[in-house]
Image (cartoon, helix red, strand yellow):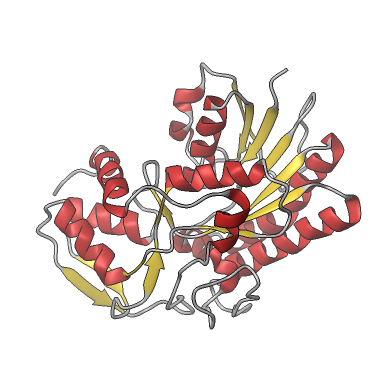
Amino acid sequence: MKQRVVITGAAGFIGSHLAEALLDRGYSVIGIDNLLTGDTANISHLQNRDFLFIKHDVTNYIYIDGPVDFVLHWASPASPIDYLELPIPTLKVGALGTHKALGLAKAKGARFVLASTSEVYGDPLEHPQKETYWGNVNPVGPRGVYDEAKRFAEAMTMAYHRYHGVDTKIVRIFNTYGPRMRVNDGRAVPAFMSQALRNEDVTVFGDGTQTRSFTYIADLVDGIVQLMLSNENDPVNIGNPREMTIKEIAETIIRMTRSKSRIVYKPLPTDDPKQRKPDITRARTLLNWQPRVELEEGLVKTIEYFRTKVSPS
């Protein structure tokens, strides 16, 4: 019997890549998504495989017939544009959605994996960020709806592990890029690419000296699968420790797209983190994982995808 995996948020950027990778590894996959920010175009190529799609809002009770071996909870708006426009659905899927997904895992005796985020560290006072760092988050700021939803989701996940004995995993995902990101996602790579491919001004918020670490989607998915199959229950950072400024990534994308764009600067949004760099010691030592795709290699593949989505002006 094939092992069955349920993925919430399966029509999203990361969820769809996870579904594809697990199918390639011989799993049977059930994808759940309410399509609030997901898109069935991301999973349409999976329809002739051992993949079942269910349109459902996971803040409501989740019913799956038959056995389930893994529940991967990826449902959530995940970009600043999304969670500023959808603050209450973001909080609900972090709280109620996590509760329902954990309930499914408990009922089925399944292993549970939570998609958490580097945003649990807030605007960090520790650099690079280790999993032991508790974070510096503004709970009442505009980004708090996402940061605190994920922090609550982590607390709920550990409560189900300690109280109910559910075998749980928490992956803290750092900035990830690749094909299937939405053009209007609002995050740095898709924003810069869509502007550069249209030869529009590339908008950098702040002075561009704030840093991020960018992980290619294939590396992230490999790390998630290795964590899913591990015996680890404490959070694990999955990210690329190559740190660069926002200005550097903008300049790189302009150069690689051969764009005529120029960089323009706008005020930094409230509580925007000034530094992001994962300490991946735990991933290296416990999972034998580290990123392998160089930034430029991943950007080439991502630009190819964005060229099919963006009409040059």
Residue placed furthest toward the right: 163
**In front: 95, or 252?**
252
Residue 128 pos. (x, y %): 49, 74
Quarter-of-image position of residue 31: top right
- For this orientation, the residue located farthest to the bottom is 125
Image vertical order of residue 290 relative to residue 139, above or below: above
Instruction: Judge from the rendering whether residue 120 lies leftward or rightward of residue 296; answer left or right.
Output: right
Residue sitting at 78 percent across and 25 percent down? 65
Give the quarter of the image for residue 94: bottom right
| Residue 198 in view here | no
183 vs 28: above or below = below
Q: Total label count?
A: 0
Residue at horizontal 32 percent and vertical 47 percent from the top: 298
User: Residue 302: x, y in percent?
Assistant: 30, 45
Residue 186: quadrant of the picture: bottom left
**Quadrant of image for the N terminus:** top right
Residue 244 visible somewhere in the drawing: yes
Residue 246 vs 206, above or below: the answer is above
Rendered residue at 54%/74% (across/down): 142
Q: Along the line of sight, which residue is nearer the eye, 133 or 55?
A: 133
Q: Residue 37: where, in percent of width, then height?
A: 50, 47
The residue lying toward the viewer, choosing from 62 and 121, is 121
Q: Residue at x 48, y 58 (%)?
A: 239
Is residue 293 left or right of 78 when viewed as pictured? left
On screen, 215 above or below 9?
Answer: below
Location of residue 23 in the rendering, given as x and y in whole percent from the top left corner: 55, 26
Q: Is residue 129 left or right of residue 267?
A: right
| Side (left or right) of 106 relative to 8 | right
